């Protein structure tokens, strides 16, 4: 042990890291020293950024959650610093304070480590993205798209994903291979953008083409959901281009794909590849891409004192915040068991992924997807209407009010309400 109490370090304080830290404190109480490291003293509520953009509101004003306050209340030490390297054999993390350039590096030791650092959203790998590309994954990019929409001339709009490169080393058999990291966002952007065009008397879905590197867009939602969705989209006039393989270049005129296909587009909205942080590549705890290898209790397969949750974990596919939330609760219990605060019989269920997604369709309408067919299960629920939209808004409110720790009735209550909601 590095001190009187076991020292637990959580790297990352977004959806996965914040929730893990909060549950470790709940289960382990004063039995641990808990240090949380994140370069940003806030969490960006990424899933709702598009709603702010299309309502022409600044997401920086409404989508940032002040996380240091939450950690202070829980008695955690919050360090706003960049993680620059990690040595799991020496149990050492190198950090550099992130609030002002020129800060000197420091090192941290740990008894238990939770890696919740997400990934790089690799827009920098797409030629021409800086000048011609748009997205909704941050306040910065949300505001950039607002400016683009303000100058929109009524041309074609292309929305879709670059190719995701999943790690295949030691991939469990139950985990499929995804060619796109997260395709709920292109679906909801497409629907909401069609509504935005109508509202601004600029056209409708006929202006929009959805594209995917895969055989089928949002394949992780399962064929029983996506096939009728595509039929509905075609009826409304959306264009659709699959098997693009990857995005190679954006130009003023459009998008070029690895397949050789191209799309003419005035606005090009791209969800990029999710690429692990460089300092995680070639470590003994990661796969050939740099995703952290864990078992279903989110524990490293080589270093039992290390856990990974959220997008940084190899078994998080697709890269969904709801999966990170489930994993955070699992990892927190494991840490509490290891430090003796919970009994071994209190581990709770292992990680069993399900796709749970609320989308914004525009016009105060939304969709709800709850499915595990991609993982071989039988569950497949897809509903549209005002209620899913209200739930999407309500979840953000609940998340902010509870500081990333929604009450345990939240998920079961959601399913109870939404699975029985007749749809509109
Ligand atoms: C446009 C879009 C819409 C989405 N919509 C949904 C949705 O509706 N539902 C859903 O479930 N999921 C959605 N997702 C996916 C979801 O955003 C991610 O799965 C989720 O954010 C992952 O959480 P995380 O905590 O693992 O990683 P992140 O959210 O990426 O957080 C990583 C944290 O680590 C910090 N960090 C990173 N590197 C360092 C470093 N070197 N040093 C210090 N700190 C560092 C970051 O500041 C950040 O706080 C969406 C994603 C996008 C892009």
Image (cartoon, rainbow, N blue to C red):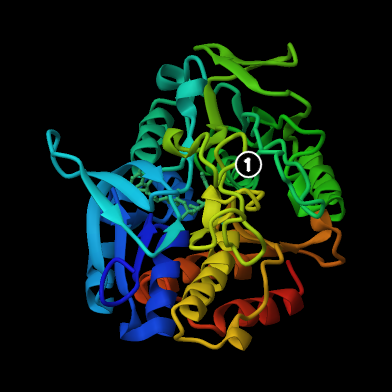
Quarter of the C terminus within the rendering: bottom right
- Compared to residue 264, the image places residue 338 above or below, namely below
Residue 184: x %, y % from top left: 64, 48
Q: In this view, does 99 lie to the left or right of 285?
A: left
Position of residue 85 in the picture relative to residue 423 (left or right): left
Which of these two is toward me, 43 or 333?
333
Camera sees residue 58:
no
In the image, residue 183 lies at what x, y percent? 65, 44
Q: Where is residue 55 in the image (x, y as percent from the top left)?
A: 42, 49
Does the rendering let one see residue 176? yes
Which quarter of the picture shows residue 5?
bottom left
Q: In which quarter of the image is residue 158?
A: top right
Which residue occupies the foreground of this view, 348 or 418? Answer: 348
Q: Which residue is drawn at 48% across and 66% down?
A: 393
Q: Position of residue 26 (x, y in %)?
A: 40, 83
From this view, report whether residue 249 is shown above or below residue 138.
above
Image point (62%, 45%), residue name: 182
Position of residue 403 relative to residue 56, above or below, is below
Q: Residue at x 38, y 55 (%)?
A: 11
Residue that label 1 marks = 181
């Amino acid at each position: 042990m590095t001190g009187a109490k076991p020292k637990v370090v959580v790297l990352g304080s977004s959806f996965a890291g914040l929730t893990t830290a909060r549950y470790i404190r709940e289960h382990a109480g004063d039995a641990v020293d808990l240090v949380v490291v994140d370069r940003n003293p806030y969490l960006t509520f990424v899933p709702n950024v598009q709603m702010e953009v299309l309502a022409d509101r600044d997401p920086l004003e409404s989508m940032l959650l002040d996380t240091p306050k939450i950690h202070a209340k829980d008695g955690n030490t919050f360090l706003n610093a960049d993680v620059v390297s990690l040595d799991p054999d020496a149990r050492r993390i190198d950090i550099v304070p992130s609030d002002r350039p020129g800060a000197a590096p420091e090192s941290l030791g740990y008894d238990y480590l939770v890696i919740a650092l997400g990934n790089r959203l690799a827009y920098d790998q797409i030629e021409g993205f800086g000048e011609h590309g748009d997205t909704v994954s941050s306040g910065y990019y949300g505001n950039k798209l607002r400016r683009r929409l303000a100058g929109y001339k009524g041309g074609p709009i292309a929305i879709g994903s670059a190719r995701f490169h999943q790690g295949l080393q030691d991939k469990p058999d139950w985990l499929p291979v995804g060619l796109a990291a997260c395709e709920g966002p292109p679906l909801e952007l497409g629907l909401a953008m069609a509504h935005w065009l109508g509202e601004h008397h600029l056209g409708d879905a006929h202006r929009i083409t959805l594209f995917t590197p895969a055989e089928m867009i949002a394949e992780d939602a399962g064929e029983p959901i996506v096939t009728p969705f595509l039929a509905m989209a075609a009826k409304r006039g959306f264009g659709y281009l699959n098997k693009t393989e990857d995005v190679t270049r954006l130009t003023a005129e459009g998008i070029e794909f690895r397949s050789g296909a191209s799309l003419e587009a005035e606005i090009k909205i791209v969800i990029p590849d999710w690429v692990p942080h460089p300092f995680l590549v070639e470590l003994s705890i990661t796969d050939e891409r740099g995703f952290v290898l864990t078992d279903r209790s989110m524990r490293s397969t080589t270093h039992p004192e290390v856990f990974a949750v959220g997008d940084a974990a190899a078994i998080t596919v697709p890269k969904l915040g709801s999966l990170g939330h489930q994993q955070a609760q699992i990892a927190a219990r494991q840490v509490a068991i290891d430090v003796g605060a919970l009994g071994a019989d209190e581990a709770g269920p292992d990680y069993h992924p399900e796709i749970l997604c609320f989308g914004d369709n525009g016009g105060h309408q939304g969709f709800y997807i709850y499915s595990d067919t991609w993982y071989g299960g039988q569950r497949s629920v897809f509903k549209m209407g005002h209620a899913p939209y209200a739930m999407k808004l309500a979840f953000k409110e609940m998340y902010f009010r509870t500081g990333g720790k929604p009450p345990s009735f939240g998920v079961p209550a959601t399913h109870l309400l939404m699975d029985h909601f007749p749809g509109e």
